[in-house]
Image (cartoon, helix red, strand yellow):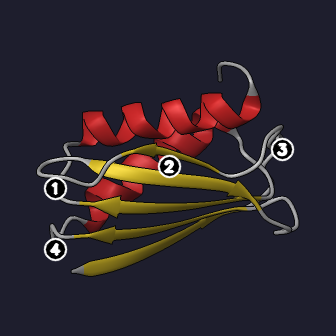
Amino acid sequence: METLHYRFENGRRPLQATAQLVGVVSSGNLEVLIEPAPLGGACEIEIRTAANGFGATWQAVMSDFQERWQLADTRICINDMGATPAVVSLRLDQAAQTVTGGLP
């Protein structure tokens, strides 16, 4: 298992709902827990993944996600069992849409 941490400053979009869980951890998938947190406008993301050595790919997917959503005061925890980047993006978008009430 590998644990990765990312923090994005200066988000502009606070969450409109309480914590939400999207997806399930099973073969080739992941779950995303998204919740409000007092982070001074930042978005923190922690990833626990069974696929070691993909930090650069995770960084690219997380940067793309935060660029789209601009989340503020948000904590995201991801438990991954080898999901593809497309599935990761889909689950993150589903979670963000659930707690913001809209599209990016």
Residue 95 sits in quarter: top right
Of callouts 1 and 3, the N-terminal one: 3
Of callouts 3 and 4, the N-terminal one: 3
Of badges 4 and 1, the one in the foreground is 1
Camera-side residue of 44 and 57? 44
Of callouts 4 and 2, the N-terminal one: 4
Report the amino acid beneath label 3: Pro
Of callouts 3 and 2, the N-terminal one: 3
Q: How far is mark 1 from mark 3, CA to CA? A: 29 Å
Of callouts 2 and 1, the N-terminal one: 2
The residue where tag 4 is placed is 52
The residue where tag 2 is placed is 63
Pointers 3 and 4 in contact (CB under 8 A)?
A: no
The residue where tag 3 is placed is 14
Of badges 2 and 1, the one in the foreground is 1
Q: How far is mark 2 from mark 1, CA to CA? A: 19 Å
Of badges 3 and 2, the one in the foreground is 3
Mark 4 surroundings within 10 Å by alpha-carbon count, few (fewer than 14), some (14 through 19), many (20 or more):
few
The residue where tag 1 is placed is 82
Question: Circle 2 sits in a helix, a strand or a loop, which is it?
Answer: helix
Pointers 2 and 1 in contact (CB under 8 A)?
A: no
